[in-house]
Image: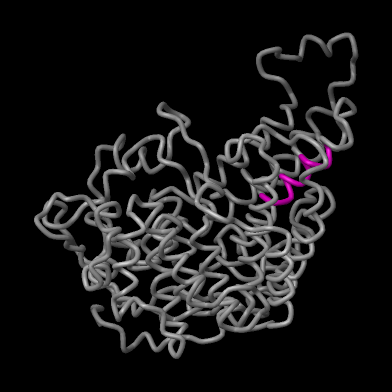
Amino acid sequence: MKKYILTIIALASLWSCQTDEQYEDYNLDPKNPAEVSADFLFTAATVSLGDQMASANVNRNIFRFVSQYWTSTTYLDEPNYDLNNRGITDSQWNELYRDVLFDLEDSRRLVEADVELTEGERTARLAQIEVLEVYTWQVLVDTFGDIPYTEALNADEFPQPKYDDAATIYSDLISRLTAVNPDFQAGSGFSDVIYGGDMTNWAKFSNSLLLRIGMRLSDVNEGLATSATTTAVANGVFMSNDDNATIVYQSTNPNTNPLWTDLVESGRSDYVPANTLVDVMNDLNDPRRSAYFDDNLAEYVGGVYGGSNSYPSYSHVGEVFLDATFPGLLLDYSEVEFHLAEAAQRGFGVTGTAEDHYNAAVTASINYWGGSDADATAYLAQADVAYDAANWRESIGNQFWIAMYDNSIMGWNVWRKFDTPVFNLPEDSGSFVPLRYTYPIGEQNLNLTNYEAASAAIGGDDQQTPIFWDTTTPDQSTYPGGGE
C-alpha cells in the first residue's frame, strides 16, 4: 500500500510547485477536472466493491474456488490454492483499500465540505458511505485477519500503518453501524446503483450488515453477538428478497457484471461447477440446480475439484450468470434468515423459532432462483433437508452454504464457521482448504515491521491460521480426494 501512498505524496509535491498564479489557468484541463465529485467517487467505490465480490477472474477473486462452488478446466494453480502465483492476495488487498476505501474517504471529505448540501442531505450521504466502508472492512478482516485499520487511510501521518486486532475492529464496526442507524432518514442520499437513493432500504441494509457481523461473533463473544443481533432486528433488517442489496449492472461495457466479461466476452471455457456442490445438490434433488447449472448434459455432473477437467464433459455455469445485467449480490434476505435461525437456536432473543427462520431462509433462496413456494415445501420435507435441532450446525451450515452460491466469500465464511459440508481436497495438490489469505507480498516489501508484528500476533502468516471467529478447525486430512 505504501507504493500508492508514495505516489500520492509525489503528486502532492508536484502540485505544490505550481505557485505562479498567472499560469494556473493554463494548467487546468476542463475535460479532466483535478477533483471529481462526491457522488462520482461514491459510485466508483460501490462498483469497485461489487466487481471485486462478483468477479471470477483468477487474477482478482478465487472465492468461487475456495468455497468449492466452481473448479477450473485450464489453470489448476488457483483451485489448488496457490494464491501467490498471480498475486491474488495483493489484488484483494489493493482493490479494497485503493479503489473502495480511499474513494469512499475522498467522497466523505467532499460531502463534509459541501456547503450547498443541507445538513440532512450531508448526514444521509455520510451514512451511506459508512455502510459501504464497514462492509469493506469486514471483508478485509474475514479475508486476512488483523489488518491496518485506525492508521490505514491517513497516508500523510501514517505512511506505514500498523495492523489492528481483528476482534477489536469487529467491535468498532458494530459500534459504527449502531450509531449510524438514525441518520438514513435525515435527508436525501446519493442516487446510488444499489437502491437508487431509497434511504429506507439503506437502513435495512445497514441493520442486516450489523446482524451479519454480530452473528459472526456467536462462537467467540456471545454477549456482543446477542446485543448486535437484537439491535439490528429491532432497527429493521431485510424482510423479503425485494430488500436485497444488489449492484445494478448495464448491458454494455464498462458497466456489465464482471461475470459476463469473464464467462462470455472472454470467449473462454475455464470454469465448470465443482463436484463438491453438484454432488450435494444432486443427492438432495435441489430445485436450484436448473438455475445454478446449465442443462448442457442429460444430468448434472460436476468437475473434479482441483483436477484437470474437459469443458464439454461436465455441466456448465447456469445461463442466468451469462447475462451482462445480472445483479451483483452483496447481501440478501436468505442470508438474514439463516443468521436469525442461528440466533433463535442459541436463544439470542429474536422472535420466531430456529426452524421457522431456517425454512424462510431456504424458501427465500429457492424463490430468488426462480423456484416456487411449492418447490421449497417439497424440498424442506426431505429428511436430509428438514431442520434438525439436535444437529443444527450441520442443518444451517449445509443449506446456508448452498444458498450463498453467488456470494462466494460468504460460502467460504459459512464453511469456516460451521465446518460443514465436507469439502474435497484438490486432486492435483491435495492442499488443505485455506482458512485465510496470507498477507500480500507488497506488505512484506513495503511495511515489513508492521507485517511481522501482525504475523506474530495472529499465530503466523499461513493459510491454515484461522480468523479469530473461526474457533474449530476440521480435520482436513480425512477429506476425500487429494493428490498426496
Q: Quadrant of the C terminus?
A: bottom left
Residue shown at 63%/62% (left/top)?
138
Callout count: 0
Write down the quadrant of residue 373 in the picture. bottom left
Examine the structure image and report whether residue 128 is included in the region drawn in magenta. Answer: yes
Residue shown at 48%/86% (left/top)?
473
Residue shown at 34%/63% (left/top)?
376
Residue 30 position, x and y percent, is 71, 12
Q: Which residues are magenta?
A: 122-132
In the picture, measured across the screen, residue 187 lies left or right of residue 466, that is right
Residue shown at 39%/50% (left/top)?
56
Q: Is residue 237 above or below residue 477?
A: above
Write down the quadrant of residue 126 in the picture. top right
Q: Is residue 140 above or below residue 323?
A: below
Residue 239 position, x and y percent, is 57, 56
In the picture, measured across the screen, residue 215 lies left or right of residue 122, that is left
Examine the structure image and report whether residue 192 is included in the region drawn in magenta. Answer: no
Residue placed most toward the observer, 190 or 366: 366
Residue 223 position, x and y percent, is 73, 82
| Residue 219 seen | yes
Q: Is residue 90 above or below residue 214?
A: above
Q: Main secondary structure of the magenta part?
A: helix
Taking the view exactly as shown, the residue that stands out farthest to the left is 298
